[in-house]
Amino acid sequence: MPPEEDGGGNLKYGLIGLLLLLGVVGIWFAMSGEGDPPPVPTAPDTGPAVSHSSLAQPMIEIPDEIEDAGPDADAAPEVAEDRVVIRHIRDPWDCSGSIDAAAAARIIRGYDRQIRSCYERQLKQNHFLQGNMSVMVRIGPNGEVAGTRVSGSLRSPPVFACVRNIARTWNFPATGGGCAVVSVPFSFSPRE
């Protein structure tokens, strides 16, 4: 029968090598130390300490004002680099002209069916659509439509856009004295 092996032969040599390595590193750190730590600096003796009471406030001295001598006589005057210009831009809807109200109303009422059809198309999408709408038309001196505004409680952007497009095609008689503004109310509700 062969002799039993103890199986840890190489492990012993590895442990011995590791211990030797740790010992060498420890000795190296011990010998490479910087020696004694540097001395702690101490404050020089300035005499007896003076303590202030918390009730006594130190006095603050405020110097007298010194008058400014002004700019040097030899210095060039300062030139402002930034300049603010305020311009009043006239509101294009602020018109001073006039137009015959009856003639304007007849022209606008001639387009009632087209305006109602704008509403009827959206009523098919929303069966509860109803409300008021005001159409404001800015009329140029020669009678052409120079601008339109639509607002109201109807709250339907597609109806407002459709009415604005129709209003841009309107032609009025010439105004007297510049542009004129006409405002016409409309009321929409579903027919029963």
Image (cartoon, helix red, strand yellow):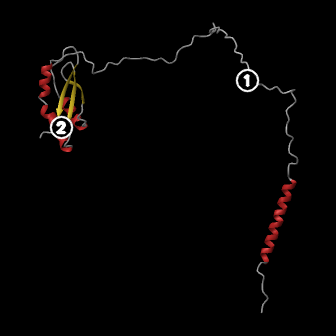
Disc 1 versus disc 2: nearer the observer: 1
Residue at the top extreme of this rendering? 73
Q: Image quarter for residue 150?
A: top left
Q: Horizontal and vertical percent for residue 66?
A: 67, 10
Amino acid under disc 1: Leu
Amino acid under disc 2: Tyr
Q: Position of residue 177 (x, y in %)?
A: 21, 14
Looking at the image, is mark 1 or mark 2 earlier in the sequence? 1
* Residue 47 as seen in the image, left or right of residue 162: right
User: Looking at the image, is 149 positioned above or below residue 33?
Assistant: above
Q: CA distance from mark 1 to mark 2?
A: 83 Å
State the image coordinates of residue 139 (x, y, percent, origin top left): 21, 22
* Circle 1 crowding by C-alpha within 10 Å: few under 14, some 14–19, many from 20: few
Label 2 crowding class (10 Å Cα cut-off): few <14, some 14-19, many 20+? many
* Residue nearer the viewer, 53 or 19: 53
Q: Is residue 41 above or below residue 99?
A: below
Mark 2: secondary structure: helix
Quadrant housing residue 42 = top right
Q: Which residue is mark 2?
A: 119
Q: In the shown orientation, is residue 37 left or right of residue 164?
A: right
Residue at numbered disc 1: 55
**Nearest the eye: 52 or 191:** 52
Seen at 14% across and 34% down, the residue is 114
Write the residue at 12% across / 20% down.
102
From the viewer's side, name the closer residue of 58 and 123. Answer: 58
**Numbered mark located on residue 135 in the image:** none
Tag 1–tag 2 contact (CB < 8 Å): no
* 192 with respect to 76 (left or right): left
Residue 80 placement (x, y as % from top left): 52, 15
Which quadrant holds residue 125? Answer: top left
